[in-house]
Image: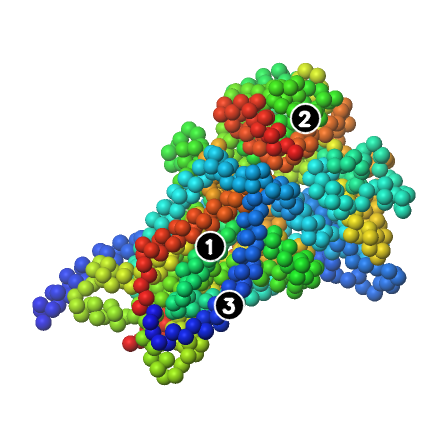
């Protein structure tokens, strides 16, 4: 940005300082503490450390050999991929569709937002009742429609991945949808009018005008989606707590929580947190590079 | 004349099919987003025993399966007005602070070039990854030392929740706002500069009004995230008069593992006010969305 | 369209509010005002009153929450002191909060907490006052408790807490399911062989013999299968390795559990269901046997009120040296007075009075229906309903009460061991491997 307006740098301080003061005090400093914790020996959340680990990088070695960590990494990567395709992808599609229609646009914009308003605990309750083994909605439906012999265990090793992914995908589509809609509305109608005069309409308009102009917002959503998928915790925990079935459904976020609270291995949980952060930053920077944001 | 009419007829026919498809998709998704709410509401009025056997029919008030008991139990337990007030106070404060601080920071990060820019951006992304329970205890300790946390005084306790929540929301708000502000053509600002406006003036006179829908979007998310953030609230708000509505209702239904009716009623009580606020504010957002379209 | 949505929402809110308000009127006299808020009207203030901070687990949805709040109100009236009540449901987060409070110096004045290893951190840091020290200044403190039932801390062998109520673990049975399968309600002489053949009959009827969630709560079955392979004298032994006598005893216990799993006597989704789901089987008349604790009685009273007499308390089948009437139980939580309150002259008396009131015979009797207490005079619960009576009868026939051995393990070891139960029953790990893995984490 070589505009003369922004050559003098001192206003930077005023703009950045307040926000970063907050971040520094309430996030960075505690996280430094967290990094330190991953080298100590702490055996209960809230209790004092009992000296350093032996060796001090013990937890990081543990991560290498822990089969549950491998599972968690794999599942989190799957979750990230699903997020990009389903959450962001579907949200983009819906936003584009809503942008084209006139009647009912307002209604759709309002109701697509609803899932975000309900807390994850409440959603977990709802989905648990849908997938419940004894008398859940799906099993009841199947029983009456197909007269099947037994109930399906949706949390068994055959189905658990779909059961875990579906609610998480569903919940956040509305989030990205709203961001895309806001982004779409930032595109002035004059651009479209000019395009129409040139004969571009329908799909052509979408691909050659809308999407490029949405590039920045798209990049934002990808970054948010990827980082969110890596640390997601609430909904998967309520539905598939403790890695059920058989330690197969661990995610980075749920595994860390379990280690901190249920296993009391606070230092290991801290190490996992460090890993999550490093992965998140790497992925975000990579997607930024790939989708090089354009300044206008 | 006839040629033009013919052209417009095929034109219409060509548009009808994609329109139909669009509406089908949109309606389908709309049903999936509205249905869970509907489901929760009807089950909050249903007699306890019936929820698992028959949770998908409507318990009309004249049927035997209708009951107000769930609300009765929930309401008898607590001081609702106070809890709602606490929730609103916290969330509104958080939202206001986040919008102000994030806006300033996002603007600076987009427009200014400086040496440390990549690192600062990396830090912002990193801070978005920190899981809340890895930072909560050091924050608690710090606030105790500062005399904010665990004082037993209601206002201070609310403040002790507000501060970490502001920090937690800042990073994602900055990223979202960065995406939107980047889409604003810089020419307007340069013109203002030539008219003698400095960056601070530009921020308040140009960026804020133009990006109003973006700010509105961010504020809704910040509000919701703060409202539903059970973990932080649980840790800092101990005494009955400081408790928020989400905390209160979580307590009521926490061990009611099978009392789905009570849980549904709790969800309704938590969610309805927020939905109401959103629906009423929709007007402002939609209006903002069209006003925000850049002219010329 | 928007307006109608808004209108609908407002109507719903109004409906909810009406329902709530309508409910508040008939609230009986027992309904306490939100405790620290409502000041008692025009009371002559006794000379030195103070505010006491108290944390217990009688919050959230605990069955005794109402009793606790009533007792607190009484205390406030009696002494003129105010109580800041930070009680919450007992769970891992609550424990973390308590520990953090001690670490940061914001601990309460009186704390109701666990008696075993969980309390070690703050006992070792000398943050609570021992009974001996209190009795040096207040000789009749905890005078109404049996000395033999005061539990010394595993950290240094001294008694710190005044026990309130205890617990027992035994077998709940669904008599309706049993009669449907043609099985007699088990009695005091129930053996493991009879149990297996009963389960076979129940399974043949297409019902689930045992309600248990192996992935979430294998705790009770662990205790009793280990007990069945040992006796009450050695039940509390912790093995040094899976190969020593105690380790082998544990392995045999796991084998028994595995046998039940392989014979199909457990719910089909026992490895993925939550405890709430499997207990629901009992409520739905789909399962016959459930091992659970005294706290579950209230659950049945609340959720099975219309068919409460379908449920009875009986005994877990015995094997070898264990009689069916030897059960697990004891006292696991009690009231601590923190050094912070002790050294504050204003608060010391208030704290003593508080604990005295809440552990008095009268108050304890209200909390108790059938549980174990340390009271010299025993508790005098009144108005037992049919299932409570059944529980009381069961307790009456108890021959030995043994503390659960799992409470002597560290939280990490316990979590790891139970996390491996699902691997043991499916053959993924041997019992010996799991035991060794758990022991390695035991500090």
Q: Is residue A174 visible?
A: no
- Badge 2 element: loop
| Quadrant showing the C terminus of chain C | top right
Q: Nearer the viewer, residue C317 or B179?
A: B179
Query: Which disc is residue C420 wearing?
Result: none
**How far across and down, in percent of the image, does residue A63 sit?**
49, 38
| Quadrant showing the N terminus of chain C | bottom left
Q: Does B173 sit left or right of C317 as displayed?
A: left
State how far apart marks 1 and 2 are (Cα): 45 Å
Q: Is residue B163 visible?
A: yes
* Residue holding disc 3: A17
* Residue holding disc 2: C238
Task: Mark 1 and mark 2 in contact? Answer it, CB < 8 Å.
Answer: no
**How far across and down, in percent of the image, does residue C64 sit?**
71, 44
Query: Which disc is residue B126 wearing?
Result: 1
Q: Nearer the viewer, mark 1 or mark 2?
A: 1
Crowding at label 1, few (<14), some or many (≥20) Cα neighbours within 10 Å? many
The image shows residue B213, relative to residue A170, as above or below, that is below
State how far apart marks 3 and 1 are (Cα): 18 Å
Circle 1 chain: B
For the point 84% across and 46% down, which residue is it?
C356
């Amino acid at each position: 940005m070589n505009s003369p307006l922004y050559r003098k740098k001192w206003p930077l301080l005023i703009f950045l300082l307040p926000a970063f003061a907050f971040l520094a005090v309430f996030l960075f400093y505690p996280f430094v503490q967290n990094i330190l914790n991953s080298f100590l020996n702490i055996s209960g959340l809230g209790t004092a450390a009992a000296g350093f680990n032996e060796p001090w990088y013990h937890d990081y070695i543990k991560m290498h050999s822990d089969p549950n960590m491998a599972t968690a990494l794999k599942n989190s990567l799957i979750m990230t991929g699903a997020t990009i395709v389903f959450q962001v992808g579907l949200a983009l599609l819906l936003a584009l569709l809503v942008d084209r229609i006139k009647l009912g646009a307002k209604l759709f914009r309002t109701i697509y937002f609803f899932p975000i308003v309900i807390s994850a605990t409440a959603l977990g309750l709802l989905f648990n009742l849908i997938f419940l083994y004894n008398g859940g909605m799906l099993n009841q439906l199947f029983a009456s429609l197909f007269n099947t012999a037994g109930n399906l265990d949706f949390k068994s090793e055959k189905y658990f991945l779909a059961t875990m992914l579906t609610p998480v995908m569903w919940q956040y589509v509305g989030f990205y949808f709203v961001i895309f809609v806001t982004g779409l509305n930032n595109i002035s109608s004059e651009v479209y009018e000019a395009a129409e005069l040139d004969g571009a309409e329908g799909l052509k308009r979408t691909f050659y005008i809308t999407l490029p102009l949405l590039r920045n917002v798209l990049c934002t959503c990808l970054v948010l989606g990827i980082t969110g998928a890596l640390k997601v915790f609430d909904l998967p925990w309520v539905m598939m707590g403790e890695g059920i079935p058989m330690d197969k459904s661990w995610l980075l976020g749920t595994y860390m929580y379990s280690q901190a609270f249920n296993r009391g291995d606070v230092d290991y949980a801290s190490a996992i947190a460090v890993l999550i952060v490093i992965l998140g930053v790497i992925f975000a920077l990579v997607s930024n590079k790939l989708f090089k944001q354009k300044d206008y | 004349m006839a040629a033009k009419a013919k052209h417009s007829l095929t034109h219409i026919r060509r548009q009808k099919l994609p329109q139909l498809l669009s509406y089908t998709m949109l309606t389908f998704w709309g049903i999936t987003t509205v249905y869970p709410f509907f489901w929760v509401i009807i089950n909050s009025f249903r007699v306890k025993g019936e929820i698992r056997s028959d949770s998908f029919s409507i318990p009309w008030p004249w049927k035997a399966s209708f009951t107000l008991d769930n609300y009765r139990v929930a309401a008898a337990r607590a001081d609702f007005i106070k809890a709602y007030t606490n929730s609103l106070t916290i969330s509104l404060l958080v939202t206001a602070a986040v919008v102000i601080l994030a806006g300033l920071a996002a603007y600076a990060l987009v427009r200014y070039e400086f040496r440390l820019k990549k690192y600062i951006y990396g830090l912002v992304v990193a801070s978005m990854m920190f899981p809340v329970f890895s930072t909560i205890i050091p924050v608690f300790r710090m606030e105790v030392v500062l005399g904010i946390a665990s004082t037993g005084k209601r206002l201070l306790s609310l403040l002790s929740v507000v501060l970490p929540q502001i920090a937690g929301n800042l990073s994602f708000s900055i990223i979202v706002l960065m995406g939107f502000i980047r889409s604003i053509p810089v020419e307007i600002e340069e013109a203002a500069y030539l008219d003698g406006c400095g960056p601070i003036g530009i921020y308040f006179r140009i960026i804020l009004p133009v990006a109003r829908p973006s700010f509105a979007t961010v504020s809704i998310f910040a509000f919701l995230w703060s409202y539903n953030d059970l973990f932080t609230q649980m840790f800092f708000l101990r005494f009955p008069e400081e408790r928020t509505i989400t905390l209160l209702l979580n307590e009521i239904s926490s061990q009611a593992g099978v009392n789905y009716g009570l849980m549904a009623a709790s969800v309704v009580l938590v969610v309805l006010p927020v939905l109401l606020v959103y629906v009423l504010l929709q007007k402002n957002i939609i209006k903002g969305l069209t006003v925000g379209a850049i002219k010329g | 369209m928007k307006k109608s949505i808004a209108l609908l929402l407002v109507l719903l809110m109004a409906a909810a509010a009406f329902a709530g308000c309508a409910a508040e009127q008939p609230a009986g006299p027992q309904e306490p005002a939100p405790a620290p808020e409502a000041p008692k009207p025009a009371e002559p203030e006794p000379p030195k009153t103070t505010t006491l901070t108290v944390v217990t687990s009688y919050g959230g949805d605990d069955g005794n929450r109402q009793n606790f709040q009533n007792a607190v109100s009484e205390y406030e009236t009696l002494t003129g002191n105010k109580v800041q009540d930070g009680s919450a449901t007992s769970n891992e987060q609550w424990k973390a909060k308590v520990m953090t409070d001690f670490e940061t110096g914001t601990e309460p004045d009186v704390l109701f907490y666990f008696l075993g290893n969980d309390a070690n951190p703050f006992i070792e840091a000398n943050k609570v006052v021992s009974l001996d020290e209190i009795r040096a200044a207040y000789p009749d403190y905890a005078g109404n408790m049996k000395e033999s039932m005061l539990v010394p801390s595993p950290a240094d062998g001294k008694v710190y807490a005044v026990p309130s109520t205890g617990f027992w673990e035994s077998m709940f049975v669904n008599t309706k399911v049993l009669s449907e399968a043609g099985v007699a309600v088990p009695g005091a002489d129930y053996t493991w062989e009879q149990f297996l053949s009963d389960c076979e009959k129940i399974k043949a009827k297409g019902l689930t013999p045992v309600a248990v969630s192996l992935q979430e709560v294998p705790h009770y079955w662990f205790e009793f299968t280990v007990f069945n392979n040992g006796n009450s004298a050695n039940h509390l032994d912790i093995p040094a390795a899976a190969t020593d006598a105690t380790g082998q005893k544990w392995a045999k216990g796991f084998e028994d559990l595995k046998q039940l799993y392989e014979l199909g006597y457990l719910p089909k989704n026992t490895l993925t269901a939550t405890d709430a789901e499997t207990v629901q089987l009992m409520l739905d008349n789909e399962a016959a046997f459930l091992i659970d604790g005294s706290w579950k009685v209230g659950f049945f009273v609340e959720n099975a009120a219309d068919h409460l007499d379908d449920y009875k308390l009986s005994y877990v089948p015995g094997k070898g040296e264990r009689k069916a009437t030897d059960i697990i139980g004891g006292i696991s939580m009690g009231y601590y007075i923190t050094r912070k309150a002790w050294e504050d002259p204003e608060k010391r008396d208030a704290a003593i009075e508080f604990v005295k009131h809440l552990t008095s015979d009268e108050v304890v009797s209200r909390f108790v229906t059938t549980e174990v207490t340390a009271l010299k005079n025993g508790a005098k619960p009144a108005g037992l309903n049919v299932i409570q009576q059944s529980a009381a009868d069961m307790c009456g026939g108890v021959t030995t009460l043994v503390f659960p051995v799992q409470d002597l393990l560290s939280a990490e070891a316990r979590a790891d061991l139970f996390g491996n139960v699902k691997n043991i029953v499916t053959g993924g790990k041997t019992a010996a491997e799991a035991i060794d893995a758990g022991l390695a984490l035991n500090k």
